[in-house]
């Protein structure tokens, strides 16, 4: 049978009812086609075969209907299921996708990743295209390929910066997994890493296997090598096992196990090290479990413990970890109803001491029972109740049980522009102490308050934009009679930080052991500029002060009563001034001495992802030392704080980014944290180098150096600075994420 050069898909259709595909139709077009339609077809010149989503282009094609096999040679090109193959010769059984191509050049198209299977660290939603070549490619069924003597890279065509050279490479698009045997990575023409086995995800979905090793150095531990293994146990269970070799300290074994159920979730972290530097066995355990038992019942367990006080200071390079001073071990059970809830908690602490700045360990709660309720519009009033029974335990201080109850009612009177809320309550607290010179005692105090405010607004224009300007005055009055509380122990009370939120509270103390006497009025004014089109708050200014009509006689142990007529004045100003600029400033002004005692200024400039500048300054007052009393420890003085903090990420040149942080204590004349780094992103790979110095104790510092090579589609080699950068530089963005925006 001879067909003309104008043959089309409609001219020849070969179909077989016994083929496994539902759509088994096949079409062939070519300059010339000949053969028996029910036996064999031979086509030459610009041949194109199409079948079930696959397209085969070639110079010559021989198709056998009985075996459903196509043989192609010349300029052969196959496109199917995100795969493009090009080579000189190919055999393929079309129905079951079994075949072979000689000397192929291939391209794997990136696919949308399944978000449900992505790890938490995965930020990209679209995987990158991959390409390479091989001596032989075997098609082993739908979406499965085996390559001999292959290369693999995610760099674009004409960019050969890095390759994965593989003796045997398996690609499974049904599971989106690549597996390589006898492989090495070549970067810039230099082999940098050999592995007998490596597997990797094609779509960033989580999978079991070795993760990229991390390499680095720190001043306290020396050279470090970490080789983590990820175990994808099940869709809702996984684990990471992380051996960490430190040249000065030895081998640390670490692991993390995560689990998630319909009604529970949790995480377990553990580390162990036989430290050659200290000749001690060092370890850490951090476990957290949360569970919902029913509609009303829930609970949680948390256990944190380390082997010694210096564990984090010696073995961590993150300032939020090295500054940890207390670790909690607690169990909590909660019951929640429509308008009330109850709970039970047992909590103990491990205190990590700095010998040069010791702290008093907190009390353990053994146990604490709580009952809280809120019933709005109950017989015309809002009813609220807060109560607890807590047993406080401590190895050196006064111990005992505290029983407290605070029922109260309020009457909110509200309209569209104003509100007034009178409130009345009675606080009752009783103490049952163990073996102490302090007597068992109780305290009953009525508490009266009136909260009121107005909301006024008007339309206005600034710089050609429409805004809604608000004026929001607020007045808050509190009355609590004085009661001597000097014979009451202090289990958990501390003076709250004086700020706008605290100005509108009844009690300036936290905890339940001190309730201030009050005959006071707080007055504040807030004004905001809200963009009419977007509702975005562009600017806010606030001013407030508290006025006393009687001396403040209730103090913490070691404190001194005061007869101030007013507090310091609080003022703040700031907002998202433009889409790229944000600025905030606050001050606490002492009217007695005529100067500010607390200040903070911060500003950030973020014109685009990858471009961020942050600056802040803060000044905090010190705390005077207190003397020791029977059963009550002395409180060490706290020096004032004056700190400058500057951080940035900014492009230095095309593909080059610089990162830095400079956090300096003007009071101590000491660097709190210093960080400097540079990052280069070539599109298919990135390299970043970071130096960091942090204060880990009163006179202790830790130096770290990170260098990391990230090969897109394979993983990261070297020590990982990304967590440090994200924590230290507000607004930091991984440059690889910028490539996918």
Image (spheres, rainbow, N blue to C red):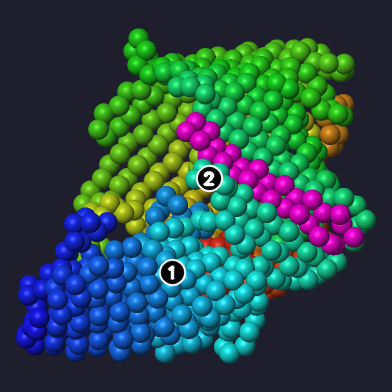
| Picture quadrant where residue 75 is located | bottom left
- In magenta segment, residue 499: no
Q: Residue furthest top?
A: 379
Q: Residues within 10 Å of mark 1 (few under 14, many from 20)?
A: many
Which numbered circle lies on residue 145? 1
Q: Secondary structure at mark 2?
A: strand
Which numbered circle lies on residue 31? none
For label 2, the residue is: 234
Q: Residue at x 53, y 56 (%)?
A: 207
| Picture quadrant where residue 673 is located | bottom right
In this rendering, which labeled residue sits more in front, label 1 or label 2?
A: 1
Q: Residue at x 90, y 61 (%)?
A: 277
Residues rendered magenta in the picture? 249-276
Task: Calculate the distance from the C-alpha at mark 1 to the C-alpha at mark 2.
Answer: 25 Å
Q: Is residue 15 left or right of residue 408?
A: left
User: Residue 615's spot in the image, x, y percent?
Assistant: 54, 67
Q: Residue at x 24, y 88 (%)?
A: 59
Quadrant where the C terminus is found in the figure: bottom left
Q: Is residue 6 above or below residue 662?
A: below
Q: Is residue 99 above or below residue 321?
A: below
Quadrant where the N terminus is found in the figure: bottom left
Let me know if residue 466 appears in the view. no
Q: Residues within 10 Å of mark 2 (few under 14, many from 20)?
A: few
User: Residue 528's spot in the image, x, y percent?
Assistant: 34, 50
| Picture quadrant where residue 476 is located | top left
- Quick one: label 1 or label 2, which is nearer the N terminus? 1
User: Residue 251's spot in the image, x, y percent?
Assistant: 81, 60
Q: Secondary structure at mark 1?
A: strand
Q: Residue at x 42, y 34 (%)?
A: 475
- In magenta segment, residue 269: yes
Instruction: Name the one closer to the observer, 165 or 14.
Output: 14
């Amino acid at each position: 049978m001879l067909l003309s050069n104008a043959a089309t898909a409609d001219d020849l259709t070969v179909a077989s009812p016994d083929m496994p595909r539902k759509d088994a139709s096949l079409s062939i077009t070519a300059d010339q086609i000949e053969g028996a339609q029910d036996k064999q077809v031979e086509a030459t010149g610009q041949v194109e075969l199409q079948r079930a989503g696959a397209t085969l282009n070639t110079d010559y094609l021989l198709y056998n209907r009985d075996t459903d096999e196509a043989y192609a040679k010349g300029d052969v090109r196959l496109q199917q299921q995100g795969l493009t193959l090009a080579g000189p010769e190919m055999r393929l059984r079309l129905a079951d996708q079994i075949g072979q191509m000689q000397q192929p050049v291939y391209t794997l198209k990136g696919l949308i990743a399944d978000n449900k299977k992505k790890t938490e660290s995965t930020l990209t939603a679209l995987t990158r295209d991959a390409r390479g070549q091989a001596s032989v490619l075997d098609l082993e069924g739908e979406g499965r390929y085996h390559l001999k003597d292959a290369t693999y890279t995610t760099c674009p065509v004409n960019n050969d910066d890095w390759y994965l050279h593989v003796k045997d490479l398996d690609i499974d698009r049904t599971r989106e997994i690549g597996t390589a045997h006898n492989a090495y990575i070549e970067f810039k023409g230099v082999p940098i890493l050999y592995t007998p086995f490596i597997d990797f995800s094609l779509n960033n979905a989580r999978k079991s296997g070795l993760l990229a090793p991390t390499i680095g150095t720190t001043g306290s531990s020396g050279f470090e090598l970490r080789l983590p293994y990820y175990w994808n146990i099940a869709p809702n269970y996984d684990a990471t096992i992380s051996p960490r070799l430190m040249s000065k300290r030895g081998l640390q074994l670490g692991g993390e196990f995560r689990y998630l159920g319909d009604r529970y979730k949790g995480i377990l972290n553990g580390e162990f090290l036989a430290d050659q530097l200290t000749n001690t066995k060092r370890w850490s355990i951090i476990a957290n479990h949360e569970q919902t038992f029913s509609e009303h019942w829930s609970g949680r367990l948390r256990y944190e413990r380390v082997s010694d006080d210096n564990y984090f200071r010696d073995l961590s390079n993150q300032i939020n970890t090295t500054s940890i001073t207390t670790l909690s071990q607690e169990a909590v059970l909660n019951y929640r109803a429509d308008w009330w809830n109850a709970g039970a908690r047992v909590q103990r602490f491990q205190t990590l001491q700095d010998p040069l700045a010791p702290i008093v360990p907190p009390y353990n709660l053994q146990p604490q029972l709580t009952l809280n309720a809120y019933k709005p519009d109950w017989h015309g009033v809002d009813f609220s109740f807060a109560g607890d029974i807590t047993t406080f335990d401590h190895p050196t201080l006064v111990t005992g049980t505290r029983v407290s109850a605070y029922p109260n009612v309020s009457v909110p009177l509200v309209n569209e522009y104003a509100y007034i809320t009178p409130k009345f309550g009675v606080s009752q607290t009783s103490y049952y102490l163990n073996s102490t010179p302090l007597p068992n005692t109780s305290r009953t105090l009525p508490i009266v308050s009136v909260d009121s405010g107005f909301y006024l607004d008007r339309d206005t224009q600034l710089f050609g934009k429409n805004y809604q300007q608000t004026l929001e005055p607020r007045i808050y009055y509190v009355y609590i009679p004085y009661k001597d509380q000097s014979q009451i122990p202090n289990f958990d009370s501390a003076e709250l930080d004086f700020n706008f939120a605290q100005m509108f509270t009844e009690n300036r103390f936290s905890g339940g052991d001190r309730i201030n006497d009050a005959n006071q009025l707080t007055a504040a004014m807030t004004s905001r500029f809200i963009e009419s089109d977007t509702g975005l708050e562009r600017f806010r200014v606030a001013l407030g002060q508290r006025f006393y009509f009687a001396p403040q006689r209730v103090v913490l142990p070691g404190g001194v009563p005061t007869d101030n007529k007013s507090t310091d004045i609080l003022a703040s100003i700031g907002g998202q001034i433009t889409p790229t600029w944000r600025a905030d400033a606050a001050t606490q002004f002492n009217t007695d001495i005529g100067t500010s005692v607390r200040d903070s200024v911060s500003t950030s400039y973020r014109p685009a992802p990858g471009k961020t500048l942050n600056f802040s300054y803060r000044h905090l007052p010190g705390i005077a030392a207190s003397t020791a009393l029977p059963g009550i420890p002395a409180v060490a003085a706290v020096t004032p704080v004056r700190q400058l903090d500057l951080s940035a990420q900014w492009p230095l040149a095309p593909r080059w980014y610089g990162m830095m942080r400079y956090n300096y204590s003007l009071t101590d004349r000491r660097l709190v944290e210093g960080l400097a780094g540079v990052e280069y992103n070539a599109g298919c790979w990135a390299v970043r180098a970071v130096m960091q110095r942090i204060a880990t104790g009163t006179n202790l510092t830790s130096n770290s150096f990170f260098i990391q090579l990230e090969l897109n589609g394979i993983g990261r080699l070297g020590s990982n600075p990304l967590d440090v950068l994200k924590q230290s530089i507000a607004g930091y963005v991984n440059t690889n994420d910028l490539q996918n925006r």
